[in-house]
Amino acid sequence: MQKTPLYQKHIDSGAKIVPFGGFLMPLEYTGIRNEHMAVRNTAGLFDVSHMGEIWVKGAGAKDFLQRVTCNDVEKLHPGQAQYTCLLNSDAGILDDLLIYCYDPEKYMLVVNASNINNDWDWLKQQESENLVLENASDKISLLAIQGPQANKILQRLTDADLSSIPYYSFITHSLAGVKEVIISNTGYTGAGGFEIYAYNENVVQIWDAIMEVGKPENIMPAGLGARDTLRLEMGFCLHGNDIDESTTPLEAGLGWVTKLEKKSDFIGREPLIKQKKDGVSRRLRAFIMEEKGIPRKGYQITDLQDNIIGEVTSGSISPVLDNGIGLGYIQSGTLKIGDEIRILIRNRSIKARIVKPPFI
């Protein structure tokens, strides 16, 4: 198992360490609910250095990314980021990722930790002329400061105007005495904030600085447990749970990042065109429990006549709502938002209702 450069910080802070994506990562420090609410109300700091970073450079970089991702890279301008997917030839989702555009010949891909090697192998298989691929995952660390006070806290460590960075945009600037740090306004919590990319040798300095200047706002370190419940409250997909090679973007509600009309052809396009024409047989739906119960991955979903119509892919208690929420694939048909369903929990049929995300 690999360790991030902040591993000892997590141990010293009393974190519960668990294996995740090939890394030993902090699940929680003071409790998932406590960390979750800190991010919703003030600010939390995550170590997400297990994520992978892959550079795509050269005159053929844009055309290459147009071919291997489903979103439209032509719409990206320097300083902007884009959410997209890598698809296989059947339109299954190999990974969901971010593309950072530096210029038309230089991009950085941010991929999921458990998929770094598979994504790298796939990209190398598709490699074309006038292209340089570099897997920098072992060199770059990633922090996420999230919450309504994140801007205020981070601003104390840089003379860049953070409020001027639009959503899904980034700058490269000095931060906490470290030069050439990528400061990105994206996020996976719905609480606002920034992602900070720095070289491994500098990330401890940045972590310490953020924790120190954030004391007036009671910033706290947050683990992967809170990160999961935060993203679930927003209805965001998690690769390996809600999306994988057996699911397509159209089934997962990711049609908004699937540009079938873009000029460049892309891997998986033809199956998606057919699926859009014929209609999907299942859809990823959000639901909220109407009776006491915690939905978990793998639990069966039924209609009111006890017919099995789907399966839960993500589920938990929402700390904000203090209620069970989840995502799951449900057979396409007559069920729609607002309709009642049942979740089978320990052989009990528990009431739930289909809703439109986000949950809060």
Image (tube, rainbow, N blue to C red):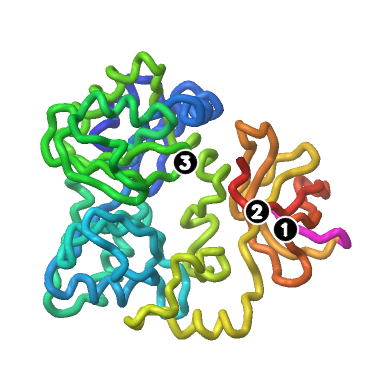
In the picture, residue 338 is in which quadrant? Answer: bottom right
Mark closer to the chain start, 3 or 1: 3
Of the pair 226 and 1, the residue shown nearer to us = 226
Mark closer to the chain start, 1 or 2: 1
Q: What element carries label 2?
A: loop
Q: How far apart are marks 3 and 1 (CA)?
A: 23 Å
Mark number, residue 337 = 1
Tell me which secondary structure the magenta stretch mostly adopts. loop
Mark number, residue 356 = 2
What amino acid is labelled 3 in the image? Thr
- Quadrant location of the N terminus in the rendered image: top left
Q: Are marks 1 and 2 in contact (CB under 8 Å)?
A: yes
**Where does residue 224 sit, x and y in percent of width and height?**
44, 37
Q: Report the residue that reaches farthest toward the right.
A: 305
Question: What segment is highlighted magenta in the picture?
Answer: 298-305
Q: What element carries label 3?
A: loop
Of the pair 321 and 328, the residue shown nearer to us = 321
Whether residue 94 is visible: yes
Residue 355 against residue 9 in the figure, above or below: below
Instruction: Give the residue drawn at x 38%, y 59%.
Output: 83
Instruction: Give the residue drawn at x 39%, y 21%.
Output: 219
Would residue 130 be found to the left or right of residue 327 on screen? left
Instruction: Give the residue drawn at x 41%, y 66%.
Output: 94
**Where does residue 360 sit, x and y in percent of width and height?**
61, 40
